[in-house]
Each structure stands twice: as structure tokens, then as C-alpha cells.
Image (spheres, rainbow, N blue to C red):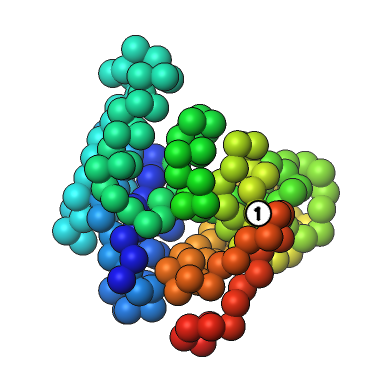
Amino acid sequence: MKRIAVLASGRGSNFQALIDAIGRKEIPAYCTGLITDNPDAFAITRAREAGIPVFVLEYGKYAGKDEYERALCTTMHDLQADLFVLAGYMRILGPAIVREFHGKILNIHPALLPSFPGLHAQRQAVTYGVRVSGCTVHLVDEGMDTGPIIVQACVPVLDDDDEESLSERILEEEHHCLPHAVRLFCQDRVVVHGRRVHISTGGPAA
């Protein structure tokens, strides 16, 4: 059984998708904790209802980014997780943390990377006029949404879509893609060669 920890800043619907998938034994892992920078995040309620320890590192209580990240790094080490999942975590991890936990951090992004990295990806997609968007689960590197891609799913952009409606439909796919990617990782089936990710056929069937 792998140990996973989740970092989230908001309502935590992707976190809930992971909780549910673990509960259904679809992911061979258990969650060692939730780390959040937001003491009002609804993800905290989800964690407590599932009996998952919560670690609140409120950004405003630290002198700056360096101090905050030292505390974050310490907390991540204490959790002894095999995998850290960014599920709506609204801060960019500094290079020191990315290097410290290289190959052990996954992120979910609401666009088909490398298109529309960063904030407001759904708004970017609507504004640009693409016909297809979607979501991407990738390993985290030191760039902005530039890490090796594990799973992607396509979502059509409709003529009457706005940022909110497209976001809702992409989120439905996120709830499938993130647990799937975490399951592959926990089955030791994610093999990285440079920028390319290969999914091995060993272990349980996908």
C-alpha cells in the first residue's frame, strides 16, 4: 500500500474523488494527510469526515515565501508520503521542494497542456476560441505546468460556453482522470523517460 498526501486550497472536489476511489479500493493506497494553505478551505471538512489528518499552513502567518516553504517541506517530510497530489493547490511550489520530492508530485490542470498553462485555463480556452479543451494530470517539475504528462482527457468547447460552464464539464473529467493517474502511480506503472511517460502493462489491469 502506497502512502499519499494531498495539497488543496479550496473546495476539494478532486480530493473527494480520491477519497472515494480509495474507499472503493480502486487505488492501492491510503491518505496520510491533507495540507492546506487556507484555513477556510472546504477540503478540510472533507478530510475530517474521512478521518484524514489536516495540516493548516496559513500562508499569511509566515514572514514570506521562503519561511512558508520551509514549513511546507518539513510537513511533507513528516507525512512520509510516496506521492503528493496537488488537487486545487493554488500556490506554485518552489524549486527546492520540487527537487526534494522529485518524481513524487502530481498536479491536475484544467486544460490540455501544453496549451493554456497557469491560472484561468478555462477562460483562456474560451477566449482563444479552441474547439476542444480538457484536463491533464502531470508530474511536477520546476516549470509552470510543464512536467511529463501522465493522463489527459478531452472536453468539447461548445458555442455557448463561458468560463463557468466549461469549467464544470472539465471538472467532471478531472474527477475521473486524477484517481486514474494516482492509481497508475500507486501500481508502479508510471515509467518516465525524459519528457515521455510510458504506462507499463505490469500489475493489475487498468
Residue 62 visible in the displayed image: yes
Quadrant of the rendered image containing residue 75: top left
What amino acid is found at the position of numbered circle 1 in the picture? Answer: Pro
Q: Residue furthest top?
A: 63
Q: Nearer the viewer, residue 33 or 187?
A: 187
Q: Split into 4 quadrants, where in the image is the N terminus?
A: bottom left
Q: Position of residue 169 (x, y in %)?
A: 59, 62
Residue 167 visible in the displayed image: no
Compared across the picture, whether 116 is left or right of 32 comes to right
Classify mark 1: helix, strand or loop: loop
Q: Nearer the viewer, residue 204 or 120?
A: 204
Compared across the picture, whether 132 is left or right of 18 comes to right
Q: Position of residue 52 (x, y in %)?
A: 21, 55
Compared across the picture, whether 129 is left or right of 160 comes to right
Compared across the picture, whether 108 is left or right of 111 comes to left
Residue marked by disc 1: 148
Q: Is residue 159 above or below residue 96?
A: below
Label 1 CA crowd tier, 10 Å (few <14, some 14–19, many 20+):
many
Q: Is residue 14 above or below residue 199?
A: above
**Residue at (32% x, 79% y) in the render:** 24
